[in-house]
Amino acid sequence: MKIKQIQITGIGGIDDLVLTFDEQMNIISGPNGIGKTTILESVAHAFSGLESNLLKRRVSSECGIVKALMDQGNGKFEEKTYQITEFSPRKTEHTGSNEKYPKFLISLKIARTFNYIALDAVSRDVDRDIYSTSSSNKHGVNLGEVKSWFVNRYLYSAHPGALSDARMHNFYQAKKFFSLLNSDFEFSRVDAGTNEIMVNTPAGEIYYEYLSSGFKSCLSILFGILKEIEFRFGEPGFKLDEFNGVILIDELELHLHPEWQAKISSILSQAFPSAQFITTTHSPHVIQSAMPNQVIALHYASGKLERKLLPANEYGYQGWTIEEVLTDVMGLGDTRTDVYQSAIQSFQQAIDKEDYEAGQLAFINLEKLLHPENNLRKLLSFQLGAIKG
């Protein structure tokens, strides 16, 4: 169950927008306030039939409308339409329910880290009925359940027949999650006396709660998705690589170093190859590693919000510089600071007037601003030398 297309009219800051989604990875970018999170919530409401106050009609609209084209597989599609009439944050709205949709939508909000939790007892799996599933899609995956779920699988995996083939397969893959970002890290064991999850690192064995915030953010996504799949589909289980639903992730790059930002989308596709991801990002590193059909760059054209037309080629943006992604894809006007712009403008004015002394002062100031290896320094020096006489 995936989503092929969505039309959002008169909701939040969106007047009228039609988006067609890639069947595997979708990365939504655009300035703050342009409507990226509204798109995620509109998709979530289409699947879950939520009663919430997360979506509000546009202030200038009498009613907001969402039309979603749901891909049921095997060439079958179904259109889901709902309205948003409320504007007050005090009032909730129900967008209609369908019991076959909610379990195929998993939502991860921006809270994607975890603190130490003492696990005195290992609980059984949580029953995910239609109401608790819809609530999870509204508020985001409950990360507090991950530790107990993992320890449960570890303990029962030692007993033949205790776990179904699908759950044994999922646990085997889950142990590999610790190494996906960095092969120097790997799952070690679960301590029998304390139920603590231990991880081998270059510095030695540590509690998994002691991993960096970036590591924990990635694990929150990976384990959160897998845990939800197992809770929602019950016995005999659903293999993670066969899950063909939609996964929403707000601010995909959260807590991640640029090196890992460039890896995260491919890691997710590797872990859940049959799923459809719809994510938002402010990171040029995430976009740089994507293909053109996977990037949904939003911008305003003649006052209307629309998807930017991007060049398509075999390698996507893998040969583009960060500056080129920022300006041509993400719409950043200039990648230099105002301080630099003022300094280079002063230098160019001095050159135009052939004022060597003023140019020399501006050049000295620019030298302090430029990167030590920047080739622009040599070009500016040539320009200055040309007016010295």
Image (tube, rainbow, N blue to C red):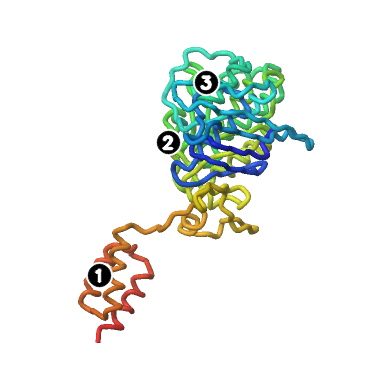
- Looking at the picture, which amino acid does disc 2 mark? Ser
Q: Residues within 10 Å of mark 1 (few under 14, many from 20)?
A: many
**Relative vertical location of residue 223 with respect to residue 319 in this rendering, above or below:** above
Q: Residues within 10 Å of mark 3 (few under 14, many from 20)?
A: some
The quadrant the C terminus occupies is: bottom left
- Residue 218 in sight from this viewpoint: no
- From the viewer's perspective, is 263 left or right of 73? left
Q: Residues within 10 Å of mark 2 (few under 14, many from 20)?
A: few
- Residue placed under numbered mark 1 in the picture: 362
**Relative vertical location of residue 21 with respect to residue 225 in this rendering, above or below:** below
- Looking at the picture, which amino acid does disc 1 mark? Ala
Q: Which residue is more in the foreground, 78 or 58?
A: 58
Residue 145's disc number? 3
The total number of labels drawn is 3
> Where residue 145 appears, x then y in whole percent?
52, 20
- Looking at the picture, which amino acid does disc 3 mark? Glu
Residue 345's disc number? none
- Between the residue at mark 3 and the residue at mark 1, the CA separation in whole angstroms equals 59 Å
- Residue 330 in sight from this viewpoint: yes
> Where residue 111 appears, x then y in whole percent?
45, 30
> In which quadrant of the rendered view does residue 361 lie?
bottom left
Pointer 3 with pointer 2, Cβ within 8 A: no
The quadrant the N terminus occupies is: top right
Q: Which residue is more in the foreground, 318 or 160?
A: 318
- Between the residue at mark 1 and the residue at mark 2, the CA separation in whole angstroms equals 43 Å
Pointer 3 with pointer 1, Cβ within 8 A: no
- Residue placed under numbered mark 2 in the picture: 212
